[in-house]
Image (tube, rainbow, N blue to C red):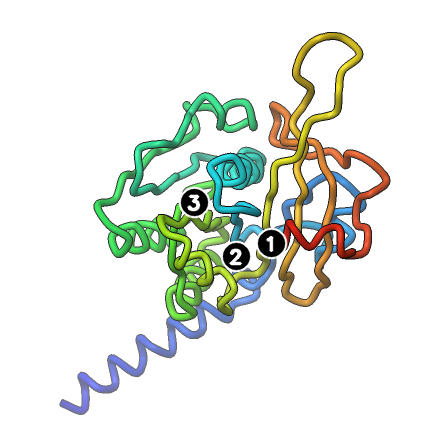
Amino acid sequence: MEGAANRVLHDLRAKVARLESPQLRARTILPFGDVAIDGKLPGGGLVVGALHEVAGGGNGAVDGAAAALFAAGIAARTVGQVLWCVTRHDLFAAALAQAGLGPDRVIYLEAGDEKSLLSSFEEGARHGCLGAVVAEVSKLSMTASRRLHLAAEASGTMAIAVRRWRRQTEAADFGQPTASATRWRVSALPSVPLPVPGVGRARWLLELIRCRAGESADFLVDACDGEGRLRLSSDLADRSFTARDARWRA
């Protein structure tokens, strides 16, 4: 009995030692490539071995799609395959490709329910051989987010939770505290008019709502290009919050 207890204690100590090893704590940064955005993030970009959250600025499909494309652009700039976990059948692969995430890099996983999706999300983040793991989740508790963050940190994999809701009442969950390193909100804006007939590049209001060891900020950006990169759209980027912007944060 005593021998079994010692083995359990030894295993726990070894696990703690692995989690605290300098190699695992060394953080890789994924910059956006824009000084204004990267300057607001500790280290100059997104921490790769961490959990990040993204949501649409409103409850409509357009803002939800913008949030998914923002996540796709980030995942596209990682190295390796990307696991994308869903519970609904409305993910448009061609749109992800326009954000730089081609179909040859994406492994799609359809879960039967939210519990299975979170389990798959965590396993993917823990795997260690993926460039990024993206999951469309409605609810994310502090406990679940901690498990995801630790799994991402241990494997050095980018984990992105795209928040989606089936009902208006579920949207309030996005305001609850989680263990994510950053929390973003993306709202679709009218594109800049072109000098010739046609549709210009999409624009987004990108809000950095929460940033661990950093400050909140918002940016007016052109949507991700074919390499997943953003571009600041005007000198309105990183402006201070005004009453005019309240409608985007409501």
Q: Residue furthest bottom?
A: 2
Residue position for label 3: 133
Residue position for label 1: 47
Q: Are marks 3 and 2 in contact (CB under 8 Å)?
A: no
Q: Is residue 120 in sight in this rendering?
A: yes
Q: Residue furthest right?
A: 235
User: Which amino acid type is shown beneath numbered disc 1?
Assistant: Val
Q: Are marks 2 and 1 in contact (CB under 8 Å)?
A: yes
Dot 3 or dot 2, earlier in sequence: 2
Q: Are marks 1 and 3 in contact (CB under 8 Å)?
A: no
Q: Residue at x 76, y 8 (%)?
A: 196
Instruction: Classify 10 Å Cα crowding around label 3: few (below 14), some (14-19), many (20 and above).
Output: many
Is 156 displayed left or right of 85 in the figure? right
Task: Please identify the quarter of the rendering in which residue 109 is found.
Answer: top left
Residue position for label 2: 50
Instruction: Classify 10 Å Cα crowding around label 1: few (below 14), some (14-19), many (20 and above).
Output: many
Residue 71, numbered label: none
The alpha-carbon separation of the residues under discs 2 and 1 comes to 6 Å
Dot 1 or dot 3, earlier in sequence: 1
Q: Residue at x 82, y 36 (%)?
A: 234
* Rendered location of residue 225, percent (x, y): 64, 26
The alpha-carbon separation of the residues under discs 1 and 3 comes to 14 Å
Q: Quadrant of the C terminus?
A: bottom right
User: Which amino acid type is shown beneath numbered disc 3?
Assistant: Val
* Rendered location of residue 31, percent (x, y): 68, 44
User: Which amino acid type is shown beneath numbered disc 2?
Assistant: Ala
Q: Is residue 79 in sight in this rendering?
A: no
The alpha-carbon separation of the residues under discs 3 and 2 comes to 11 Å
Instruction: Classify 10 Å Cα crowding around label 2: few (below 14), some (14-19), many (20 and above).
Output: many
Q: Residue at x 52, y 53 (%)?
A: 53
